[in-house]
Amino acid sequence: VISSTQEFVNICLDTTRNRMMEMELKISMITLAVTMGALVAGLFGMNLLSGWEDNSSAFYITALSIFCLILFIVRITFKISKAKGVFN
């Protein structure tokens, strides 16, 4: 009886550990996507002439493009991870 109880507790702990590892991996993938967006924003934030300085809608176009890039990266990484069997 004691050994079966210990096995049950170990299985529960393993399940919890696996869920935490999966959550950590998801957070890391989202962080990667946000970092890519920050890279693009940093490049546009430099004081270099790009021709977009006089365009009144350039900020909105750039912000929307960065947001779409982040969503694209998150979606692709999650899709690849699910295809490889990382997530349930």
Image (spheres, helix red, strand yellow):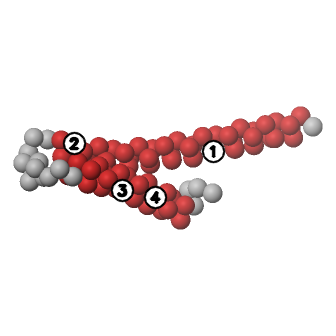
Q: What element carries label 4?
A: helix
Q: Which residue lies furthest to the front in this view?
A: 56
Residue 75, numbered circle:
4
| Residue under the point 21% across and 52% down | 57
> How many angstroms separate mark 2 from mark 4 (CA)?
23 Å
> Residue 2, position in %: x, y?
89, 34
Q: Mark 3 points at which residue?
A: 68
Q: Name the residue that disc number 1 marks.
A: 18
The crowding category of the residue bearing disc 3, from other C-alpha atoms within 10 Å (few below 14, some 14 to 19, many at least 20), is few
Dot label at residue 42: 2
Question: Which is nearer the N-term, disc 4 or disc 1?
Answer: 1
**Which numbered mark, 1 or 3, is in the foreground of this view?**
3
- Separation of residues labelled 4 and 1 (CA atoms): 22 Å
Is label 2 in contact with label 4 (beta carbons under 8 Å)?
no
User: Is residue 78 visible in this depiction of the protein?
Assistant: yes
The answer to which of 43 and 81 lies nearer the viewer is 43
Q: Earlier in the sequence, mark 1 or mark 3?
A: 1
What amino acid type should be assigned to the residue bearing mark 3?
Answer: Cys
Q: Distance between the residues labelled 1 and 3?
A: 30 Å
For label 1, the SS is helix
Structural distance between the alpha carbons of marks 1 and 2? 36 Å
What residue appears at the point 18 percent right and 41 percent down from the top-left corner? Answer: 45
